[in-house]
Image (tube, rainbow, N blue to C red):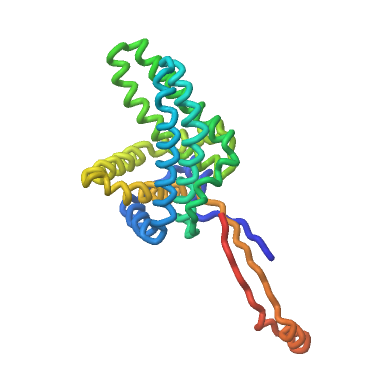
Amino acid sequence: MNKTHFVLGGDLKKSLTEGYTLDFKKIFKDAFAITRSNYMPLIIACIFTVAIVSVIFTLNFEAFLGLSETKQLIVNLIFSSFVVTPLVTGLHMMGINHAVGLKSRSIDLFIYFNIILKLALASLIMNIIILASNVALTEVLGNIGQNLSYIVMIYFNVVFSMVYPLIAEKKFTPALSIKLSFKLINKNLLQFTLLFVFLTLLAVISILPSGLGLFLFVPFYFNVMGIVYRQICGVGVVATEIVKKDDDSDNDDSNNGSNDDDKHDAGFEA
């Protein structure tokens, strides 16, 4: 068995130094095709995510309401970091796997609980940055600052959108992933802003038919982000080749030096 490591898609260092361009038409076209061929595993994983979050929130709703505002904020941060973040990371990684031609299973949603501490730490850092920025703007500029804080919150959510995949796929530390995501997206902030505007419009449209459109939009969204990640960062893939030889063909080969009867089975994994 031979294993070859290589990268599909873009180059992280090149994207950081030279920049990149997003072709929206091609990204959306590819995402639609990928969503059609990988729909069921991803939509089931999305439903699992919503169900898990809803059940936990419902069971603890009354206790949550009895807490002070500060304690509610702390509980929200903990819940988001240790429950929601690993699940969302699983969805992102399913989209990335689809973007490089790999299949996924719905159970892949739970794979990244094994790096829950890294993911939770990254989530806490990002939430603290966003919260601190909002508080600072409100304290300094009053009502105007409060309105600006919504724009700042959207901005940070955009520039931090690659943090979890960088931790899960590249195995980077939380601090480095936050730094790289910030630099990568600011390298072409205008196109990323347009991308999220288009996705937001699609999300709004998908809600209109009694929310049924979300069953198409949500898997499509994660596949879009998977393609974008592949194009900007590249995805590390391991090609595994298994070589099998017949005993009879080995004997023949020893006589004539031919190895035409060798059988090769190749597989790929992220």
Taking the spot 28% from the left edge, 13% from the top edge, the residue there is 143
Of 144 and 70, nearer the camera is 70
Counting from the top left corner in percent of width and height, residue 156 is at: 40, 30
Residue sitting at x 39%, y 21%: 65
Vertically, is 265 above or below 139? Answer: below
| Residue 70 in the image: above or below residue 194 | above
Q: Is residue 231 above or below residue 152?
A: below
Q: Nearer the viewer, residue 14 or 90?
A: 90
Residue 139 appears left or right of 118: left
Q: Give the percent coordinates (x, y) of residue 205.
A: 23, 44
For the residue pair 256 and 89, the one nearer the viewer reads as 89
Q: Residue at x 57, y 58 (%)?
A: 269
Q: Residue 258 placed where, x, y %? A: 70, 85
- Image quarter (top left, top right, bottom left or bottom right) of the C terminus: bottom right
* x then y, percent, for residue 146: 31, 17
- Rendering quarter of residue 193: top left
Q: Is residue 17 visible?
A: no
In front here: 103 or 238? 103
Q: Examine the rendering and report whether any part of residue 144 can be seen.
A: yes
Q: Is residue 64 above or below residue 159?
A: above
- Is 82 situated left or right of 223 in this image? right
As drawn, is 61 to the left or to the right of 210?
Answer: right
User: Quick one: which residue is furthest to the left in this view?
Assistant: 208
Residue in the picture at 47% in, 24% down: 75
